[in-house]
Image (cartoon, coloured by chain):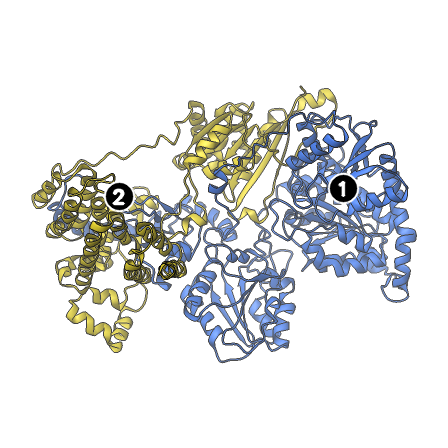
Amino acid sequence: MSVRPIKIAVMALGGQGGGVLADWIVKAGERAGYIAQSTSVPGVAQRTGATIYYVELFPRSEAEKQGKEPVLALMPAPGDVDILLAAEMMEAGRALTRGFLSSQTTLIASAHRIYAIGEKIAMSDGRQDTDAVRREVDAAVGRAVWFDMEKTAEDAGAVISAVMLGALAGSGASPIAREIFEEEIRAGGRAVERNLKGFSFGFDAAAAGAPPASARQSKAPPAIGVGAARAVKPLVDRLASMPEAVRSVAYQGLKKVVDHQDARYGALYLDRLERFLRIDAARNGADLHRLSSAVAKYLALAMAYDDVVRVADQKTRRSRFARFREDVRAPDDQIVRVWEFMHPRPEEICDMLPSAMARPLLASRQARGFLSIMLGGGRRVATTNVSGFLMLNAIASLRFMRRASSRYQSEQARIDDWLALIEKSAGADYAFACEIAALQRLIKGYGDTHARGLSNYGRIIAALDQMKQADDPAKALRRVRDAAMSDENGDALQAALMKIGGSEMAAA
Amino acid sequence: MAERSFAKEVEDLRIGEGEVFRGEGILAVTKALLQSGVSYVGGYQGAPISHLMDVLSDAQDILGELGVHFEASASEAAAAAMLAASVNYPLRGAVTWKSTVGTNVASDALSQLASSGVTGGALVILGEDYGEGSSIMQERSHAFAMKSQMWLLDPRPNLSSIVNAVEKGFELSEASNTPVFLELRIRACHVYGSFVAKNNARPAFGLKNAMENPTRDYGRIVLPPSNFAHEIEKIDRRRPAAIDFIKKHRLNEFLGGSKGDFGIIVQGGLYNTLNRAMELLGLSDAFGETDIPIYCLNVAYPLIDDEVKGFCLDKKAVLLVEEGQPDYIEQAVNSILRNADIQTKVVGKEVLPLAGEYTSGVIRDGLASFLEKHAPHLAPTAKPANVAAQSEVASIVPQRPAGFCTGCPERPVFSAMKQVEKEIGKFHVSCDIGCHLFSILPPFDIGNTTMGYGLGWAGASAFGADASQRTVSMMGDGGFWHNGLTSGVGNAVFNKNDNVLIIIDNGYSAATGGQDILSSRAVNRTKSTNNPIAKAVKGVGVEWVEEVHTYDIARMKRVLKEAMTTAAKGPKIIVAQAECMLNKQRREKPLRDNAIREGKRVVRARYGVDPDTCTGDHSCIRLSGCPSLTIRDNPDPLRDDPVAYVNNDCVGCGVCGENAHAAILCPSFYRAELIYNPGGLDQFMARMRATIISFLQRRADRRRAKLSFGDA
């Protein structure tokens, strides 16, 4: 068979440096005695879109021997790519769907994810499942080298393309020697030391055969209550009698609720939860403890509702100071100053007052207006300044009067109603009761977001009786809940509720 | 200054006879222009030929040495009109743009030019934006060549062939007194390769000679009776001259074998893809050695009847590989053979798709079908395995359309629009061409139509009814100067329009690669910049004009709402200003890094999200869509939804915080300022603050310890 070029495709997102990588490969190829050709379709796709860079290398000696110039292609052909470098997991998936992966292909792919806008804008969890992508990609290629190149690049302070170049060299899939690639990075003259380090990390990871990312570490279940303080010991002890399936969720829930207020609040949590454990204990079925597990989780979230006290408390914690330093990648000795974006509305302030005071205030236009002016719209609070910190610290310490607050009253009333509904439904339709418990998922966020969630929740609760008429009420309820979480304007929810109403009318 | 600098590469333009030139296709074209003794070059940027404009812009010193005048034209029409210099004088000129859109804009001038005919060689370099990576409607430039009787070169996509096409293109133009198109597909524009160079040539007759010795010829003006004479001249004299030249200089190539009862006719630009498809079927090798006869059309228009007839005469069937639609070449070949009573079967769109890009996979499959029927002994025994997975992966892999960059100043404009729509109801939005068109995609989903560059406001001009809601039109500063000032703003003033225009004034023609324009703030050695848009629109009679800094979302909301609801009649313009972040970062980041290295005090801002207070609703992302605002696992084991997260690409533009404020979103966002090389006061204050804050934090920790569960 006649000599064929080495075909290398790079699949990357605009801004990931796919062009730089292709350039390095071309120049290294020329240095190593190849005729190199590369192409791309940058254009506007460059602005964060998915792009392909394509390189062909043909041995110069062969061309000279024949006395002819090779005819090189300008795009990868399906089933005819020798090396495919993917700068992100889904881009490897895209290579598969475009037919670029075959048994002739060595795939060198970063296992990290860059979420697409469609995945990010979901009101809940819109992330795509990657397991199927990994499985099918691995089955399609001759050999796959996967590791988190983004993380490796960050460790080295290099660009991801340097790590990918290193992985290409380390994989042994290209005939170009390591030193030649490294010379190219040096010749580039930009961030040479860091990129060489990234190259070397990438080389080692590929040469060693990085562990598959699918072997993700599972979180060890938390040890329950070893060394618990005296005030919470009795609460922890109450967990011991719970069935295994519920205990660990209940433990997390208990911690969250106690952290929110105090031990007494934790006791209230357990009191409430135990009502559902009793329901579960009294029945036997396939999904044993499903209800109490759901309640353990959602009750904790409901009870640890987000008010200004909780926000101020979270913002001032020592652990939070350590975390923002880490998130902004600040070295230990660097001074970091932080400003919060607070936008307290009259509602949030009145939330903290006893209902007897809050209600008339909120009802009065003048009072609301006055409060709005006093609050002055958006506020930036410098938490790392003494004054800002003291202010937030003072708000956090209002915990002592939380129980008297109007928000506390209304939250507890809502929780009690909700729990009563679940309890009432559990006897007749257990699955339906579990779905009612999960409705708590709708209530989250602050300000408008919280108001929207609460209103959606209210609309669904009001339609529960209608849903009971459906063939599968639990399924109907889940569908309505999904609809509520699928669009911000509430159109999908409206349509889903209309459908419930309509089907009932049709049945009647 | 453009996004990409070619300052280093342009030095290669000086290399001389026999040296090997290495670089991108578009760079090779530049070198070929200089080798051809070109006198003037113009054009309008746009992928895939933006780099050609950028290279020329960076090469002004070399152009100056050779007496070449370069203009970054105001539009493709302006560029095409520039070729008028070659009508009366033996001056070689070249212009370039993105096609077909640019050719549409240029076609008035091109028709005039093609009618007049040229004395000096006139070359139009078309970046054919067709197929993968294209951002425009899928049409062929071929039709323009046919209707105006201009010749269309479509060379093989290797640097030597492209350079040869430039040089021969000028000669062809002069031999036939006709302007010539040179069409380069996207990948050919960006192909990296090499060719053996020649010396640059300084034109014998220069612009200065022409200006100082003007000549006139009434017969070259498009006005009766000359216009009638031009049409006859095109057919009687110019076209035969072109055909003679093409034949004599063998611009079309006969490749492959010379025997057999079938062959392939291919557009030059597709030759490499065809050869790869043949390789995959075992019919050719890496050097293009094949027994199958190939007629390679490096000149796609006009066809050379004698060559077509000669190629087809001894063949039962030919495969015609012609990309795009309609199938102009296939129709023409059929017509030539029919007229000559040659019975060769022409197989083109019968086995190849009617529309869409001809990739190697597509050509391989079409060729296989052709062989099955017309050369079964060569047909692949097994159907080529279709490795493209029909699996669930196709439904999992997310679409990744282009979008606004991290920190883009256009994003807050659309965040504000989305919020204003919530307050006053939906409105019709007429879009334009430019980065701002990304508003039509998630998360903004804002926009109704786009009618062409600079035509955003004209695209809403029908909406003159007395309605309770006004329309909003968009325009970029690039489109504004391209023609929007007249077609949009002047048009609105004259017709007493009562609607709203938002002009995105980011200081560059950003989508095409950050080239300077009239209103750029940068100081440009060879161009006049700093001509404010507000001044221009006031000059044509707009009274309601507001300039708003885009990142000030609260003010943007206020001004937009005012424009939409004010009782004041007449056109209303909001000039939304802030520098393109891509260019700003490119300019400022190296300066900042240097300052840090030199030990100067530098404060760098960026944003973050607290995962404890983020509840995973992602409202912030729906209002922003910034690539650096993403999601990660929720650290709270009880919560299902991922939390928002600002990754390390954040440039600290502040839109997150502004949105959180303006939309009353949530308190999770924070702004962090990292201080490099802090001064004495910084350090003193930091120590003092840390002492007090950590005292209070320890106290809170002690309180919490009493409620500790022992594991955290």
- Callout 1: chain: B
Q: Is residue B633 left or right of residue B435?
A: left
Q: Is residue B219 left or right of residue A234?
A: right
Q: Is residue B51 left or right of residue A202?
A: right
- Tell me the number on the disc at residue B637: 2
Please give the letter of the chain rendered in yellow: A
Would you place residue B221 above or below residue A54 in this image?
Answer: below
Name the foreground residue: A162 vs B295: B295
Q: Which residue is disc 1 drawn over? A: B200
Q: What amino acid is at disc 1?
A: Asn
* Residue B67 on image: x %, y %: 76, 50
Name the foreground residue: A79 vs B70: A79
Chain B shade: blue
The reply to whether discs 2 and 1 touch (Cβ–Cβ < 8 Å) is no
* Residue A359 on image: x %, y %: 20, 71
Q: What amino acid is at disc 2?
A: Pro
Residue at image location 46% in from the left, 28% down from the top: A145
Q: Is residue A100 something one can see in this rendering?
A: yes
Would you place residue B469 above or below residue B671 in this image?
Answer: below
Would you place residue A155 above or below residue A364 in this image?
Answer: above
* Residue A282 on image: x %, y %: 15, 43
Instruction: Please state, as top left, top right, bottom left or bottom right, where the C terminus of chain B lies in the image.
Output: top left
Element type at marker 2?
loop
Would you place residue B508 above or below residue A318 in this image?
Answer: below
